[in-house]
Image (tube, rainbow, N blue to C red):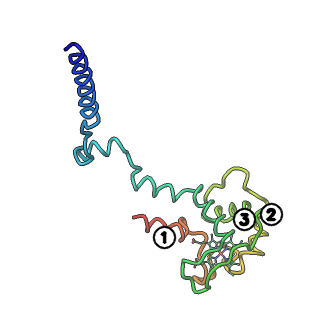
Amino acid sequence: MEKYAALVTIILVILYGTYNATRTRHTPSPKPQDTPYTQHINNHPTAPAAEELSQLDTPEYTYHYIRNVIKHGSNSLGFPGGVMEGGYIGEADAPGVACYVLHLSGKTCPAGTEKKEAHLFFSSNCAGCHGNDGRGLHGKYPDLTRPTLQGIAKQMEARH
Ligand code: HEC
């Protein structure tokens, strides 16, 4: 009889343990739709679109964009002059020329990119299409003196 009592106790302990384990495992976690939207937004703040857009229209981003165009070209703006190939000037001269282009619209260059001879590189490699004044030969090529370059304006529109 005592043997039985011990056995029953063991079985009861095991059953109780199993029951507890399944109970804790199945504690329902809150479903996503149970969280009110305002609370959810506070828990996962997203960058407001306006802030993201304003970052595109900065000298830093414009510099980065010009470097990219110099390296890879540009083909999405639909100018009568056609597309622009990349590589008119090498990587070593690109920072100075990009800074020169930034100056055309009155922007400040990133530190260390200003080069005295950059205007010479611009007139011999870029002015043939964009003009010595950067204005793009009467609409045939993009006007580089615009406050916001057209490729950047396009990116801003796409994100609206
Ligand atoms: C053979 C003509 C040609 C030459 C040379 C040329 N470009 Fe361009 N460039 C274009 C054309 C055409 C576009 C617009 C192409 C498109 O996207 O439709 C353009 C676009 C650009 C843009 C983008 C303008 C915007 O509003 O977004 C920049 C910046 C630029 N060029 C800088 C330069 C620089 C700097 C040089 C010299 C290293 C240069 N280009 C040489 C024809 C030229």
Any atom of ligand 1 within 8 Å of the CB at mark 3?
yes
Mark 3 lies on a secondary structure that is helix
Q: Residue 27 occupies which quadrant of the picture?
A: top left
**Relative vertical location of residue 106 with respect to residue 84 in this rendering, above or below:** above
Mark 2 lies on a secondary structure that is loop
Name which residue lies at 66% across and 71% down. 72
Of the residues tagged 1 and 3, which is closer to the observer?
1
- x, y percentage for residue 151? 54, 70
Side (left or right) of 146 relative to 25: right
Residue, disc 2: 117
Quadrant of the snapshot with the C terminus: bottom left
Residue, disc 3: 97
**Relative vertical location of residue 67 with respect to residue 133 in this rendering, above or below:** above
> Quick one: 111 or 158, which is closer to the camera?
158
Side (left or right) of 110 relative to 153: right
Q: Amino acid at mark 1?
A: Lys
Residue, disc 1: 154
Name which residue lies at 66% across and 64% down. 67
Quadrant of the snapshot with the N terminus: top left
> Quick one: 74 or 140, which is closer to the camera?
74
Of the residues tagged 2 and 1, which is closer to the observer?
1
Question: How far is mark 2 from mark 1, CA to CA?
Answer: 31 Å
Any atom of ligand 1 within 8 Å of the CB at mark 1?
yes
Say whether disc 2 or disc 1 marks the residue closer to the N-terminus.
Answer: 2
**Relative vertical location of residue 138 with respect to residue 35 in this rendering, above or below:** below
> Quick one: 75 or 111, which is closer to the camera?
75
Name which residue lies at 72% across and 80% down. 128
Question: How far is mark 3 from mark 2, CA to CA?
Answer: 9 Å
